[in-house]
Image (cartoon, rainbow, N blue to C red):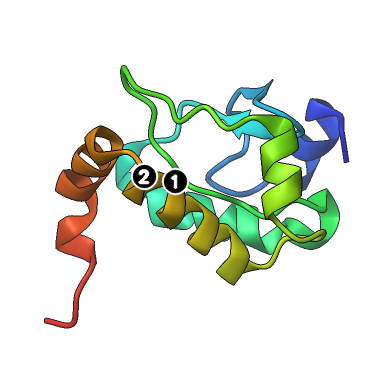
Amino acid sequence: MGDPDEIAAAFRGTVLDGLPIEEGLGDTWVVTGIDTRQLLPAWRAARAATAKTGRWPVLTTVDQWWMDAEREQVRRDLPVPPTLVAVERWTWERLVADPAALEKVWTRTAPYVGSE
């Protein structure tokens, strides 16, 4: 699916309904304007629409920093279609390679990671 209107149609009736959909890096589409209190429901809505959109949702935040991944590198590094494990591993490897990026992400996600 490569049309933002088609993706929007797949999100009707969810917390993503009516939010802007923009073309992102490579072959990605970005839904903006998600209420930060609705991040998990937003991801779940996008995940539930995977069969319609053909795209696996990846949740990220963008403030003043953006992890710029070259399209060809992503294609080379991830299997087609990408698996959740492959995407998680790829993301983690990029973060570990960039201490500044890891620091920004870790401070936000640390409360959600662990076994406590």
Q: Secondary structure at mark 1?
A: helix
The residue carrying mark 1 is 94
Look at the numbered discs 1 and 2 and tell me whether their residues touch, using CB distance below 8 Å: yes
The residue carrying mark 2 is 97
Label 1 neighbourhood size at 10 Å, few (<14), some (14-19), many (20+)? some
Q: Quadrant of the C terminus?
A: bottom left
Amino acid found under the numbered disc labelled 1: Arg
Asked if one can make out residue 111 in the rendered structure from this viewpoint, the answer is: yes
Figure check: 22 above or below 84: above
- Percent position of residue 87, x then y: 58, 58
- Percent position of residue 80, x then y: 82, 59
Residue at (75% x, 35% y) in the render: 72
Give the spatial CA distance, label 1 vs label 2.
Answer: 5 Å
Residue at (50% x, 61% y) in the render: 88
Q: Give 88 or 42, whichever is nearer the viewer.
A: 88
Amino acid found under the numbered disc labelled 2: Ala
Q: Give 56 or 19, whichever is nearer the viewer.
A: 56
Q: Quadrant of the N terminus?
A: top right
Q: Give 16 or 99, whichever is nearer the viewer.
A: 99
Q: Residue furthest top?
A: 64
Asked if one can make out residue 11 in the rendered structure from this viewpoint, the answer is: no
Q: Secondary structure at mark 2?
A: loop
Figure check: 107 above or below 30: below
- Percent position of residue 22, x then y: 66, 21
Residue at (40% x, 48% y) in the render: 39
Q: Give 13 or 93, whichever is nearer the viewer.
A: 93
Q: How many marks?
A: 2
Label 2 neighbourhood size at 10 Å, few (<14), some (14-19), many (20+)? few
